[in-house]
Image (cartoon, grey):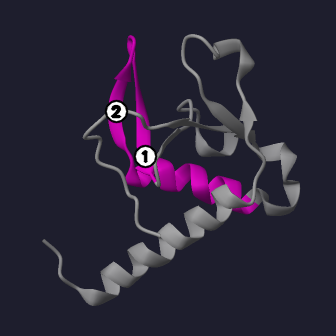
Amino acid sequence: MDLNPCKALDVNIEEKRFRGYIENVRWQFAKTYANTWPHEYTVRDWRPDIGGEFTWAAQYIRDQGMPEPFFKKIHIYLSFDGWKYWTMGNPIDETTVINRAAVKIAGEKTNDCK
């Protein structure tokens, strides 16, 4: 376990940065999957003024998330503030969408600090 207080500060700064991004973008409910896999998504091009933050957020999800199966595929999911975030696995520079779904599973460990 790394007890370096500077590392903890870096994590806190990154969490704040991620939270800032997700709070400042538009989330659209994915109607096509309403009955099978309800979730929301945001698109890089909806906020071209903060495109660099989209790229950073997508990479943060991949760096901090955990691999989980989704049918026959494996995606990296980040549990954060009661939501699970993921991308579809394309290279970061080709990633255009970030998805999220509410975490509703009892006992699911999430990052619920604010």
The correct choice, above or below, for 43 with respect to 72 in the image is below
Q: Residue furthest bottom?
A: 5
Q: Which residue does the image show at 56% across and 30% down from the upper left? A: 88
Label 2 element class? loop
Sequence-first disc among 1 and 2: 1
Judged left or right of residue 62, residue 21 is right
x then y, percent, for residue 20: 64, 67
What residue did someone put label 2 on?
105
Residue 9 among magenta residues: no
Q: Which residue does the image show at 57% across and 63% down from the upper left? A: 18
- Mark 2 Cα shell of 10 Å, populated few (<14), some (14-19), many (≥20): few
Three-letter amino acid code at disc 1?
Leu
Q: How far, Cα to Cα, is label 1 from label 2? A: 14 Å
| Quarter of image, res 92 | top right
Judged left or right of residue 58, residue 114 is left
Residue 54 among magenta residues: yes
User: Is residue 96 at all visible to an observer of this figure?
Assistant: no
Q: Which residue does the image show at 38% across and 57% down from the upper left? A: 111
Range drawn in magenta? 52-80
| Quarter of image, res 72 | top left
The correct choice, above or below, for 22 with respect to 71 in the image is below
What residue did someone put label 1 on?
78
Judged left or right of residue 70, residue 54 is right
x then y, percent, for residue 77: 42, 39
Choose between 114 and 10: the one closer to the eye: 114
Judged left or right of residue 85, residue 50 is right
- Mark 1 Cα shell of 10 Å, populated few (<14), some (14-19), many (≥20): many
Q: Residue furthest left?
A: 1
Three-letter amino acid code at disc 2?
Ile
> What label does residue 38 carry, if any?
none
| Quarter of image, res 51 | bottom right
